[in-house]
Image (spheres, rainbow, N blue to C red):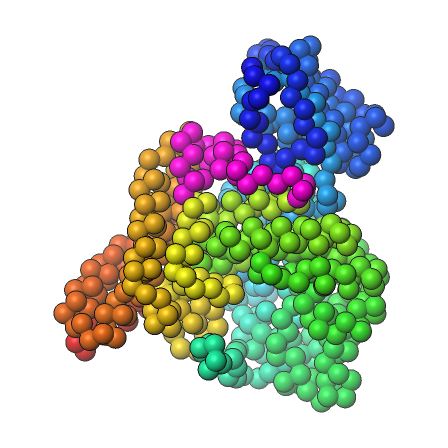
């Protein structure tokens, strides 16, 4: 085997030397050929390890269990690429961040089945991820609130216990995650809980003539911090949720408390200041979390608005510093937490939400910036967030390239090699010898650039088809894009989508389950293509091309009907409940076509 062999390893080891010769792992009793040594000669880090393959065998040196797990993950990748005939090499390796996690939103319309989550955890462990969070607002099966979650699907206590046990075996800390201040819309619609809402009803917000942002309706989402029943409500949630997790941590959310000071706490906020009211309630939550033997995590966006209060945070509360644009000021914000000696994570994102097929250029820059700032300022963790705004129509396959990229940045950002993403994904996640699934998943994430427009947290490919009925928040600007993008650019994007779909049709996964990623990616691509078609139809209508618009409407209605049928049929393979909350926009666009068709 040549010394120049290209080993596809992610995360990339910190030090890798290819030596002369090979070693063939025996088919019978292969473990006998692997020497495992716990020694202080291994890299001085809890997850540090040395992996040596010589002509005589394999040796793993480590200090703590985390190092043995990391070495084993590297060896598994080597075996998948090379088989039993391994190149002689010497690796010394350790991570940049002690805690490297993935957070998956399961509250916006897509609640994965237990089997899906077990599979996700297994793959994440292969890439040295050691923390997993499932973001919940109302999708844990709380006994007293079945009417809140039953139409969405929810994870049960038993399912969490099974997942927790599996994660524990894999060396992954499954951290409970229950938003506890804002983002509680569906709880606050429950008759017995309406009294806990900061505001009593919907109110108008947003709207900016300069940017074209449309006004929308905000519905009650934030708890009233001064209501006497608010803390007892949270106690009930915590007492039912937390016993299912073995983790010492608990993410309480507490981000985007947009209603605060508008209703029940208005006078209190005017007297004490909104920041102080927020911090006082955060401390109450902290006491509840500490009483249950957990270390509190919380999103850092609100406290960053009141930097003078950061020093007053409870000493062991972990701030989660999130931001999702390429230019997010992670360095500035991380420095504030570091200066106040508050433990913190940096939390970039996959940039998949409100895009359907991703915006990987932004995600890669965002992931890199978070790693650089977090490492420089001493962040204890790096959490890759994957949100589901707008119903969560994008599938896991769209997120996988950025899960892997984030895992690589979290372990060893300095030596990140993006060229290894596709071969590693193909080998270890999609099990596709052609590489076509990973290739398409990666290239589709750059298609939005052909449209020539940029907006935070979205692309027209995601928000046009998913544009809501008037007043809703997510994807609300989708129907404006047709007037800003030339037809030639829309067609160019659509052409590239169809090119990648054609590539997807030539995959060779090793198993029947391996066909799922190709199929779900194709469904997402079909939706993105429909965004292009809808914009072209809007342009035809605006130009007064009635006959052309009618013909387009007829064709597109048929395509959307077929897409909806396929989407619903595929849903149950990976997700709980139905697609009811995930893809209602398919019918909305059919209605748009039909209304215009009848008029014309």
Is residue 194 in sight in this rendering? yes
* Residue at point 32%, 45% (across, down): 499
Q: Is residue 57 magenta?
A: no
Is residue 583 in sight in this rendering? no
Nearest the viewer among 458 and 315 is: 458
Measured as percent of width and height from the top left, residue 341 is found at 84, 60
Q: In this rendering, is residue 199 above or below 462?
A: below
Measured as percent of width and height from the top left, residue 374 is found at 72, 53
Q: In this rendering, is residue 138 above or below 174?
A: below
Q: In this rendering, is residue 38 above or below 241?
A: above
Nearest the viewer among 42 and 469 is: 42
Q: Is residue 435 magenta?
A: yes
Nearest the viewer among 37 and 4 is: 4
- In the picture, the quarter occupied by the C terminus is bottom left
Q: Which residues are magenta?
A: 411-440
Nearest the viewer among 590 and 447 is: 447
* Residue at point 40%, 77% (across, down): 470
Q: Residue 555 sits in which quadrant?
A: bottom left
Q: Main secondary structure of the magenta part?
A: helix
Measured as percent of width and height from the top left, residue 407 is found at 62, 43
């Amino acid at each position: 085997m040549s010394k120049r062999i290209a080993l596809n390893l992610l995360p990339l080891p910190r030090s890798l030397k290819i030596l002369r010769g090979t070693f063939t792992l025996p088919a019978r009793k292969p473990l006998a050929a692997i020497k495992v040594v716990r020694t202080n000669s291994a890299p001085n880090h809890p997850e540090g390890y040395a992996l040596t393959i010589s002509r005589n065998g394999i040796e793993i040196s480590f200090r703590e269990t985390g190092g043995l797990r990391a070495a084993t993950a590297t060896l598994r990748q080597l075996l998948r690429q090379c088989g039993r005939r391994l190149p002689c090499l010497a690796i010394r390796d350790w991570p940049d961040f002690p805690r490297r996690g993935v957070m998956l939103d399961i509250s916006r319309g897509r609640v994965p089945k237990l089997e899906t989550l077990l599979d996700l955890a297994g793959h994440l462990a292969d890439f040295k991820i050691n923390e997993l969070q499932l973001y919940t607002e109302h999708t844990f099966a709380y006994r007293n609130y079945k009417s809140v979650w039953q139409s969405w699907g929810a994870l049960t206590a038993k399912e969490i216990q099974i997942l927790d046990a599996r994660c524990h075996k894999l060396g992954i800390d499954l951290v409970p995650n229950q938003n506890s201040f804002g983002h509680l819309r569906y709880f606050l619609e429950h008759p017995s809980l309406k009294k806990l809402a900061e505001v009593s009803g919907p109110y108008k917000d947003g709207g900016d003539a300069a940017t074209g942002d449309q006004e929308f309706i905000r519905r009650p989402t934030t708890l009233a911090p001064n209501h006497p029943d608010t803390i007892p409500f949270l106690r009930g949630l915590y007492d039912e949720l937390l016993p299912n997790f073995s983790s010492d941590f608990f993410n309480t959310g507490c981000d985007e408390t947009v209603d605060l000071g508008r209703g029940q706490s208005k006078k209190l906020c005017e007297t004490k200041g909104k920041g102080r009211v927020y911090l006082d309630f955060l401390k109450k939550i902290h006491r509840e979390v500490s009483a249950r033997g957990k270390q509190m995590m919380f999103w850092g966006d609100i406290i960053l608005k009141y930097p003078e209060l950061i020093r007053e945070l409870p000493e062991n509360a972990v701030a989660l510093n999130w931001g999702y644009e390429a230019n997010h000021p992670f360095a500035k914000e991380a420095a504030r937490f570091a200066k106040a000696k508050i433990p913190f994570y940096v939390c970039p994102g996959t940039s998949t939400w409100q895009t359907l097929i991703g915006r990987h250029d932004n995600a890669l820059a965002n992931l890199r910036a978070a790693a650089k700032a977090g490492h420089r300022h001493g962040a204890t963790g790096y959490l890759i967030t994957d949100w589901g705004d707008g119903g969560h129509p994008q599938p896991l396959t769209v997120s996988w390239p950025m899960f892997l990229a984030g895992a690589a940045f979290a372990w060893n950002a300095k030596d990140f090699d993006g060229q290894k993403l596709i071969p590693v994904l193909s080998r270890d996640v999609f099990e596709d010898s052609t590489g076509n699934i990973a290739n398409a998943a990666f290239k589709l994430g750059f298609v939005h650039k052909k449209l020539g427009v940029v907006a935070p947290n979205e692309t027209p490919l995601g928000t046009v088809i998913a544009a809501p009925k008037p007043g809703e928040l997510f994807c609300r600007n989708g129907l404006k894009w047709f007037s800003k993008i030339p037809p030639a650019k829309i067609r160019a994007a659509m052409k590239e989508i169809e090119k990648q779909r054609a590539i997807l049709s030539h995959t060779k996964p090793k198993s029947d389950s391996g066909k799922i990623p190709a199929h779900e990616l194709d469904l997402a691509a079909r939706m993105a293509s429909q965004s292009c078609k809808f914009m072209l139809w809007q342009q035809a209508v605006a130009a007064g091309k009635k006959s052309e618009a009618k013909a387009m409407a007829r064709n597109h209605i048929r395509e959307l009907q077929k897409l909806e049928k396929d989407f619903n049929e595929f849903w149950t393979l990976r997700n709980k409940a139905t697609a009811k909350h995930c893809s209602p926009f398919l019918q909305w666009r059919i209605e748009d076509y039909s209304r215009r068709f009848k008029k014309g």
